[in-house]
Image (tube, grey):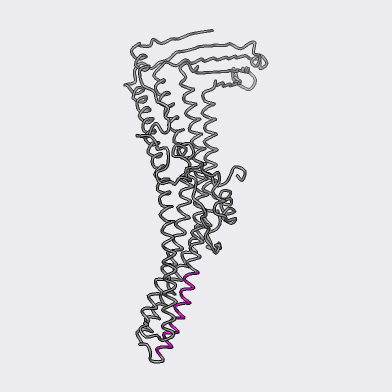
Amino acid sequence: MRSLSILAIPSALLLGACGLPSGKDATSSDLISGGIPAFWKEASGEQHDRISTGWLPEFQDPQLTTLVREAIAENHDLRAAAHRLKATRENNIRARAGRLPQVTTGTTANRRLNGSGSSGGSSASSYGMSFAASWEIDVWGRLRDSEDADNADYRAAIADYRGARLSLAVNTAKAWINLTEAQQQVDLAKQTLQDFKKSLSLISRRHREALLRAVDVQFGRNNVASAERNLRSQVLRRDEAARTLELLLGRYPAGELEATPNLPTLRRQVPAGLPSDLLNRRPDLAAGRERIYASARRADTARKSLLPSLRLTGSAGNGSPDLRRALDPSYLTWSIASSIAQTIYQGGAPSAAARAALELNKASIHGYVQDALQALREVESALQVDLSLREQESFLLIEVDQASKAQQAAERDLGLGIEGSSVLEILESQRRAVNARGSLIRLRNQRLQNRLNLHLALGGDYETSEEN
């Protein structure tokens, strides 16, 4: 038996559906008002070179490389992200399967007792088998658009995972450098305590010789107590830095990870490439472009949902008192139908859904542009900070040198009893020297942290393709 049912479609409704605008694919630099400059504003000439393929070797720290690889392998947040990515892939497969022909089958078996009593009745058995199939033909490409959107979502999820992996590598390197800086501050605090105790011993001896006042001894003791407090504060900070790194590594946060004695030395400027290259390199922007594409395809899907759909359905069934005949295809009865269905009136809901999908596409475009501008700002800022911190370090080195010389001179003058020397002079020189050394350690850490921020902003991988 064959049947065909066609619903009448008002021409105004059909033409209205075709007239709705669809989502548009978005390019990258064309979306930014005024375009993208050819070169970075804050970059020097050599920094316009192509970015390096792996930034870990720049720090020349084998232990840092080992820790980053451990974090990539053991970090639980990244593992969770990997499982979510796999779930997205499986859901994508499931959604794709829903657009394929659907086939179902069923069997029945019945036994009926006629009459009454244990000997006066009779029984009869019957068996049945049925098949059903349905398939929506993609006349307008609506199903293809929906599948394209799902595929774009999956590609966006892949880019998000790449971004999470890069962020973890950068954060691990930052945590390791913070731990090293904290250990250097502990070492400085220990040395400062020794220097203050040495000065207190000298001041106490001069006081016993009636060459200094009691208040000078009190100033010296004040410095020692302050150094003791600072040492304990720096130890606490170091242990907390160790716990932060251990957490990234998937280890128990015991605060027992030991730091290297020296911070890495930055030996060169970072090639930053060109601004236009950034949009294709950063994982978050790649994910944004895929989401624009997905939203555009969903806008098309919603628009095409206003058009009629064509669905083929088929069914087959058989009932027989003989089980073998019930399973024999030659005894099956087939019914095939095709239908073109279109909702006549839903209060404007389908058209509103199509317009809403288009607005979401426009929103995703503006969101991408904002993310792109933010990415460009991050690079420009990191380049400027890199230059500024490098210049600041050159002046801070002079400051450390002069403060150290002043401290040595003040200690020598007081020890020799040179006229005009005072305890306040030596204490002030010590304070300046300690502050300058601590500032130098912090500034070098800031330079390294900013360099890592620059690598993250540029979207470059942490290892070369051969090392990955």
Q: Position of residue 438 (x, y in %)?
A: 44, 66
Q: Position of residue 126 (x, y in %)?
A: 61, 17
Q: Position of residue 181 (x, y in %)?
A: 49, 62
- Residue sitting at x 38%, y 11%: 9
Q: Position of residue 272 (x, y in %)?
A: 47, 44
Relative vertical location of residue 51 with respect to residue 322 in this rendering, above or below:
below
Nearer to the camera, 190 or 78: 190
- Residue sitting at x 51%, y 23%: 99
Relative vertical location of residue 381 with respect to residue 370 in this rendering, above or below:
below
Q: Is residue 342 magenta?
A: no
Within the image, what quadrant is residue 389 found in?
A: bottom left
- Residue sitting at x 41%, y 66%: 399
Within the image, what quadrant is residue 296 found in?
A: top left
How many numbered circles does the render carry?
Answer: 0
- Residue sitting at x 51%, y 43%: 51
Relative vertical location of residue 200 with respect to residue 377 in this rendering, above or below:
below
Within the image, what quadrant is residue 413 found in?
A: bottom left
Q: Which residues are magenta?
A: 187-207
Q: Is residue 194 magenta?
A: yes
